[in-house]
Image (cartoon, rainbow, N blue to C red):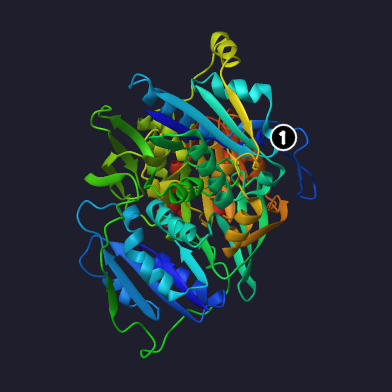
Amino acid sequence: MRSLIFARQADTAAELLAGARLLGASSATLVVIDQNPSAPDWAASLAAERLAHLALPEGAPLETALESILAFAEGEEAGLVLVEPSRSLKVLVGGLAARQASSLFCNVTHLRATGAGSYEAGVLYFGGLAEQRLALSGPVAFFCVGAGVFASETQEPVVLDAEVRAAECLELRWVEPRAERRGTARVVEERAIESSGTDLAQSEIVVGCGRGFRAREDLALATALADELGAGLACTRPLAETEGWFTHEQYLGVSGKTLRPRVYIGAGISGQMQHLIGINRAGAIIAVNRDRDAPIFAQCDLGIVGDLREVLPALSEALASGATDRG
Amino acid sequence: MEIIVALKVVLDDQDIALASDGSLDTSRAHQVASLYDLNALEAAVQLAALEEGSRVTVLTVGGPEIDDSKLRKNILARGADELIMLLDEAARDWGSFETARALAAMIAKRGTWDLVVCGDGSADRFAQQVDVQLAAALDTLVFDAVVAWEWAGAQDGRLSLKRKLEDCEQTLACTLPLVVSVMPDIATPRICGMKEILAAGKKPVSVLTAAELALDLADIEKSGGATRFELIETRAPARQKRAARMYEAASSEGLRVFCAEAAALIG
């Protein structure tokens, strides 16, 4: 069975490529779409038998690339298509699935092959309140798989011999959306969102901020604690999307990131399942909240009922003096 | 402007009880409009207000149990002009592929349209794929993650979309027709007063079956056969048992011990 992988970044691409092997793929083709004239360097070093790149012309949204990848993707005759959970790729690959009378299965929590062309997948139900186990079968299956789903399996890194690894990159030609396809769209402005600079997936300790932070100034307390611990700083969805105090990459939970830090410190987080799903596999959970009935207290190792403006500075200070004592 | 809102009716998760064996008791859960679809509806109604003669039609697809007068009024009191429902036993288990085919047939039966607005994702599966599948069925472009829009007026037929993607904020200049899905921040659902709720009772509601739509279910299932899926079970994940040692910051001793234990956990 051949597989087709759509990814935007080296780490997610590597994980999906390894995942495709776990699911029984005999070969993998990596497709990278961006605005650069040629494939990024990282793509060539990955364990894929084939590599294809599409350069988007100026002003063309990635979502309009369906016609450009269609012939190539269908020609691959892949039995398995994996895509990382990025907004634009989910739209593009979902459209590809629709063209093949199929659909893209998202929010996959686990995935295993149960036979040729058949799989068992876990998908989130009501933001992690429950999980649905699905049995899927067919000549082709499309899954959107986030970081950590395949990494949780014990596996050897995939290494391909030089002679089977993609020796060169196939450049796909841009094809304008068909005239019959209605609606037009051009990118008129694109502003990069500044990265937070930390890779949360690599952080041993993560400090998460929730609605309990009423004012932006109070975030300094969480930053101070994170700095003291060398921890990553994260948040719940409203703080990233409604308040805009954090970047999208810092938001944990359904449709955000899922992490497994050694310690998670949740400050001002009530503990909605939609957020907890992003951190409930942490080694230890420490919770700070004013509301003693906050659901997070039922799922933490250590909790304190109190104002985070009092607790966080006290904790930072205790940790700093502890570090000095040890030092 | 003819605006269609695709709205999913789901169980109210506040009323889903978890049994000790991890199974779900949904017997007390009412059928409600999926939360983020209400943001989509509000955004659509606000957009329609910018262009005289615009109409907002809400479409929903599901099992017969989703229909009740409270739900109808809840949707129509929010400024929609009309509600069209497809109610069918088979629809209860439909995935995004089948649902989108049904929605496309409902849209075709209804007539002309300019814009389809979907919510960011449904409360139950949050697959974010009905908009994508619907655009494929309607042969239209689709964009998600829309946080704001600007309408240039009917003469121009141009809609400018502002999207928030993972690594950038993007502005698109679009022409209609188009399918979009919107993020919750685009508009806050209104609180309906008694006047709106009473007026909602007089707005048109039509109920269709798959047969009336000439929607051949066997055909849909066959063509959806590229990936067939069956639900094996729905179960709450086993929760890791955690100690939940609790302290109170109100007592200085409580705060001190908490900090000491936190330091020990952090190591």
The residue drawn where x is 41% and y is 48% is: A250
Q: Which residue is mark 1?
A: B65
Where residue A134 sits in the image (x, y, percent)?
A: 66, 59
Estimate how packed mark 1 is, as few (under 14), some (14 to 19) or many (20 or more) residues with alpha carbons within 10 Å.
few
Question: What chain does badge 1 belong to?
Answer: B
B105 and B244: which one is in front?
A: B105
Indicate whether B23 appears above or below A102.
above
Which quarter of the rendered picture does the N terminus of chain B lie within? top left
Is residue B254 visible in this depiction of the protein? yes
Indicate whether B245 appears above or below B267.
above
The residue drawn where x is 57% and y is 44% is: B102
The residue drawn where x is 80% and y is 50% is: B21
Indicate whether B221 appears above or below B198.
below
Mark 1 residue element: helix
B20 and B179: which one is in front?
A: B179
Q: Tell me if B149 is positioned left or right of A144 in this view.
A: left
> Residue A238's quadrant in the figure?
top left
Where residue B168 sits in the image (x, y, percent)?
A: 29, 47
Q: Amino acid at mark 1?
A: Glu
The residue drawn where x is 78% and y is 36% is: B27
B121 and A205: which one is in front?
A: B121
Is residue B264 visible in this depiction of the protein? no
B3 and B198: which one is in front?
A: B3
Where residue B201 sits in the image (x, y, percent)?
A: 61, 15
